[in-house]
Amino acid sequence: MEFTLGQVAAILQGKVEGDEDQKVSRLDKIQEGKQGGISFLANEKYTSFIYETDATAVIVSNNFVATKPLKVNLIRVDDAYNGFTKLLEAYSMMMKSSMVGVEEPCFFDPSSHIGEQAFRGAFSYVGKNCMIGDSVKIHSHVHIGDRVKLGDNVIIHTGAKICTDTVIGNNCEIHPGAVIGSDGFGFAPQEDGSYKTIPQIGNVIIEDNVSVGANSTIDCATMGSTLIKKGVKIDNLVQIAHNVIIGENTVIASQVGISGSTTIGKNCVIAGKAGIVGHITIADNTTIGANTGVSKSITKSGTTLFGYIGFEMKNFLKSYSIFKKLGSIEERIRELEKKQ
Amino acid sequence: MEFTLGQVAAILQGKVEGDEDQKVSRLDKIQEGKQGGISFLANEKYTSFIYETDATAVIVSNNFVATKPLKVNLIRVDDAYNGFTKLLEAYSMMMKSSMVGVEEPCFFDPSSHIGEQAFRGAFSYVGKNCMIGDSVKIHSHVHIGDRVKLGDNVIIHTGAKICTDTVIGNNCEIHPGAVIGSDGFGFAPQEDGSYKTIPQIGNVIIEDNVSVGANSTIDCATMGSTLIKKGVKIDNLVQIAHNVIIGENTVIASQVGISGSTTIGKNCVIAGKAGIVGHITIADNTTIGANTGVSKSITKSGTTLFGYIGFEMKNFLKSYSIFKKLGSIEERIRELEKKQ
Amino acid sequence: MEFTLGQVAAILQGKVEGDEDQKVSRLDKIQEGKQGGISFLANEKYTSFIYETDATAVIVSNNFVATKPLKVNLIRVDDAYNGFTKLLEAYSMMMKSSMVGVEEPCFFDPSSHIGEQAFRGAFSYVGKNCMIGDSVKIHSHVHIGDRVKLGDNVIIHTGAKICTDTVIGNNCEIHPGAVIGSDGFGFAPQEDGSYKTIPQIGNVIIEDNVSVGANSTIDCATMGSTLIKKGVKIDNLVQIAHNVIIGENTVIASQVGISGSTTIGKNCVIAGKAGIVGHITIADNTTIGANTGVSKSITKSGTTLFGYIGFEMKNFLKSYSIFKKLGSIEERIRELEKKQ
């Protein structure tokens, strides 16, 4: 999509200094700006680039004063950073809403229903008795199993798999290759050392405004529901086991693993690669550090955990600082022993 | 699928107390029971729910005695938990076996053979010269490469990829997005610092009754076979490198990684996120704790390992308990030094 | 593909001892050789197998002298190992280049361009305005988004997803299920505890000779580009976040995670499961051990890091050896305290 600088200024309620009719079709970093791109200048550190950039235009704050001649067009706004963010959102919104229609071939069981302004990509699959809301974008190679419910404005990216009976709220985004509702890992040990599969007949419920990252996996419940509450943000390659519950607005970084039947509170932050055992409860507002192992319930809101088996972060860092010099610690003990 | 309570009682060899003709189509937890669902009561803790549940029926043991009026239908059996498990299996079996036929469009090379009672979903792909057994379910978006062999009753879930020359036994289940037989990670360093790809011409052999979790990856051997023996259960997002051998009935939890050419014994349990280096051997009946690193062969059956570089679990926990108070340990040494 | 031993000898510039007209279609390990396979003998340890193998032929070095009667055909070359490697490469090259043409149904937007000698598998998808080079192999279920550029001789394996605006150089190989160019994990915290999605409008640039493993994920930049330089080799289930830069010929093993905006130097080796925090810089030639956490920039080329929070490997191992006996360390302190 192309816009004239005049059109951009109108969106931002700003003013063009330069040629209103020049066109931009791309957002560029100011230091990498090229013809046809529009940048912004919000951080003084980057001021020098405005005199060199090949971008077609730069968004600046009203108080910007050039100290050298400028070859670039300017769009002046109250606050350059806010202006740019606004432009970013407008651009992203337009890109998304412009996808409407059906690419062939695709598969849609006639017992299912989909709302208006929908997109269904080539090789997408929608099974039986699904209820799908308005403005839903189902990209290529997406699988939607039987009896799935999707709210409005949901985006299911290419190759994501939404298994049977999953329920997803409004404004959710499921990124490429994610698997929602795969069977939980449940096996009953038999006397001969083998294992028998325990049928997994529950589902996954995802509330509004949730994001699930690329190639992440969320298992269905053995019975009942694995539950991801509203506003939860999940990064790539995360594993969430059967019957887990994640509280509102909790953020989970890449490669985290949460074992079965654990309940996580709301507004928690779980850093990359952390692992949480099954059947425990984590209080609201807990922060769990990168690669931290959590083996017991956290009952106090606001706890910050870190470590191989996590404990209070500042204590862990103290212990680890001494761990690093354990060689000299042993040496000091040897000295003391000698002197006796 | 709907059943009358009379039909359910017949399956369970039990007796209906209430209306035999009422229908159920779903298995519910007793505390979440809704009209059309059937629950069970096996744990006294949940007894109060039987008087409140909205489920259509509850399976109870013959010795259950109601102490208040009941609005729900009962099905009495010898043992309520066993009865429910039986129902679960019957339900799961029916769901699976009811999938028969071919959804279009799908791709099936005419040089390949598939047995009876098969299902092939839309956009599934079967390459050249494959031999596929009876009652195999190939879901939507599954890729099966050339010369693959699948036994009977295999389920390949949506979007799983079974690469060229893979062999899979009977009763295996490959969950969504799993990749079986991708190229091993083999590169020969060159004098200029670059790497040259070593062609990976081996395959993966999976024996009977194996389960592979969603988005897990099992690489083919450089030459010969990566081998997953019968009864192995592998969770989601697990990595198994080229030329690994996993012994019978070993269980591998989510996000575990096993490096190239390592051999794991039978009846091992490997907890989530554990990592095992290449070219070692792990004895039968070894238990490897969560996030444990294994850097050396384990020769003694029944070993339990835990820790960043794993050693005997009870010793690790002892060391870690002192690690947590290393601050005070150093303080005590300082005191001793002062007193000299 | 089948070759006579005469043809194989011609490729290897070697000499057949036995029946030139016998045919082989497979490369076997000597200890597992079967009729129709060709093996090699390069390591004395395996010499005994040459008298027993059922392979049709064995490649041996010119200086090999049989000490017992042989039933197998021989191909004599200067160096058996080099000969076999040459054969491996020839075989692998032939397998790849023999895939040409289009399987139906597949999706290819008419605004896109693809070069000669291409393969496009069934259910592959190529979006709008893509520029794709010569001899590119796009396997089944591959998704290629709008405006993607692919160089020559690129192989995109089954089910890999190349998102919008991605640029990939020559001779790259993207393994099954990998996701290139998914949205970065960027959310702005709001006053009510919820998060707002920050649009991710950058892309991923992958230079020549890069390999990306099965089910790995590489996020696009928030703005600008996530950059994977030439010769980088990435294993399975690796996460590379937005705006990361990876230097030339760096090797990254399975399940590694690299957080946003971090820059990795060239010729680094990053072992399995290592995790690197965001916004840091790692010097050239750094070696990062398995499961190592990296929390600070590394400025000195040639550093070797290891540990939960990584430091110089040899120091870590010293500290860890004392950690293992912390129980007795505390005991020694207690003894010293008693004796005062």
Image (cartoon, coloured by chain):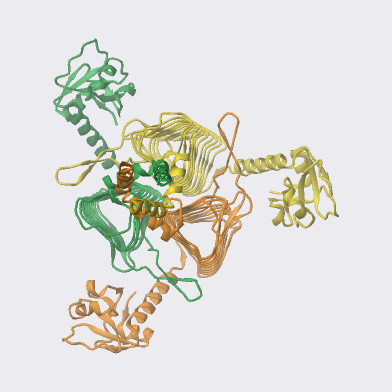
Chain colours: A green, B orange, C yellow
Q: Is residue A34 left or right of residue A17?
A: right
Q: For residue B139, say whether it is visible.
A: no
Quadrant housing residue A30: top left
User: Is residue B312 positioned above or below C118 on the image?
Assistant: below
Q: Is residue B112 left or right of residue C157?
A: right
Of residues C165 and C181, which is closer to you in this image?
Answer: C181
Q: For residue B184, say whether it is visible.
A: yes
Of residues B103 and B170, which is closer to you in this image?
Answer: B170
Residue B288 percent across, percent down from the top left? 45, 59
Residue B138 percent across, percent down from the top left? 48, 61
Image quadrant where one finds the N terminus of chain A: top left
Q: Residue at x 27, y 81 (%)?
A: B58
Residue C25 percent across, percent down from the top left? 70, 51
Of residues B217 and B91, which is closer to you in this image?
Answer: B217
Toward the top, the furthest residue is A69
Q: How many marks?
A: 0
User: Is residue A79 positioned above or below C210 on the image?
Assistant: above
